[in-house]
Amino acid sequence: MDSEQINAVKRMQSFIEAHRTEPITLAGLARAARYSPWHAARLFKEYVGRAPFEYVRQRRLSAAADQLCAAPRKVIDVAFDFVFDSHAGFTRAFTRQFGLSPRQFRRKKPSVVLFMPDRMRSYYPPATPGNAPMKAKTAQPQSQVVFVQIVDRPARKMILKRGKKATHYFEYCEEVGCEIYAQLGQIKQAIHEPMGLWLPQRLRRPGTSVYAQGVEVPADYAGPVPAGFELIDLPPCKMMVFQGPPFDEKNFEQAIFSLWDVMKTYQPELYGYEWADDDAPRFQLEPVGYRGYMEGRPVRPVNKAKAKPARTKSAATPHPSQKKTPKSGTLQRKR
């Protein structure tokens, strides 16, 4: 175990206990952990076994259950104390956790196990040869190599969970919870791993977010859809997939921003394509250090009648990352 990571999780747990009756955000937890929001959330799940906001919800509900039995207060007042925005929402969450509504719980005072903080162990394995922690290489290449591939996507369906106003992962995690990715990963007939999505206008619903999370399933999928999720159809499309170089996972944000810088200047027209953002959701895969950050954006072949004439000597030089696009197959790997 990494002592610094364990201390970071302990700081997040202390922060949660001190702010149970106040709004808690992933940014706040990250400040307590002294890590980036994404890395803080991953550490918490790894060491505690629960996503941060699942843990927060269970701690609040347990404290609420204690109060319901200790004092004759209105259920709605207890709900507001623990940052639930409605009586109905509090009752649903409370009933899921304890199997009884708040009123039934107060009346029956059942013997239940309340969810208490999972304190991290304060000991670490001895640093003997063979189990000493590996030090990550921090040296970064002078120039970033980005691989690009055109991928044909067939007609398929997607199981997704929408947010409210989220435009990126961290806002989504605060609105919906950080455990959605894990729920999507349990769908057995998934074609690929779960992904973050920026939905085109035609796939959005009024009052829902641009950013969502989902997983693709076959076009003939007829299996269950988890409560609160929905199943949508996606037509065939082409995706231009970008893959950055491997990175130290502590620097995942820099890996994302670096790839975004490349994508902003990338000119698909040089290779016979144009952006087609209405055709499908733009997606991002979970940043995993060993494979590099990956993101895909929909494209379509350029109409030859609209094709630009050959460039002259005065034309702008393409970005260094714009190597010749492979026609098919897996992404090129760095040798």
Image (cartoon, rainbow, N blue to C red):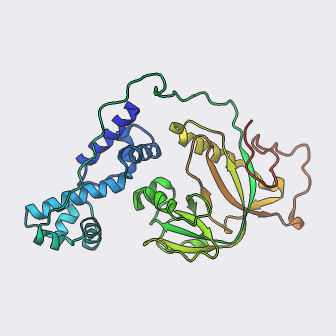
For the point 46% across and 64% down, which residue is it? 165
Q: Nearer the viewer, residue 236 or 48?
A: 48
For the point 25% across and 67% down, which residue is it? 94
Percent x, y of residue 163:
46, 65
Percent x, y of residue 254:
57, 40
Figure check: 134 above or below 67: above
Percent x, y of residue 90:
26, 68
Residue 199 visible? The answer is: no
Figure check: 173 above or below 253: below
| Count of numbered labels shown in the rendering | 0
Which quarter of the figure is the C terminus placed in? top right
Q: Nearer the viewer, residue 68 or 74?
A: 68
30 vs 287, left or right, is left
Which quarter of the figure is the N terminus placed in? top left
Figure check: 134 above or below 160: above
Residue 22 visible? The answer is: yes
Q: Nearer the viewer, residue 96 or 320?
A: 96
Percent x, y of residue 302:
82, 63
**What is the quadrant of residue 76 in the picture?**
bottom left
**What is the quadrant of residue 99 in the picture?**
bottom left
For the point 58% across and 64% down, which residue is it? 190
For the point 60% across and 27% down, which residue is it? 139
255 vs 167, left or right, is right
226 vs 248, left or right, is left
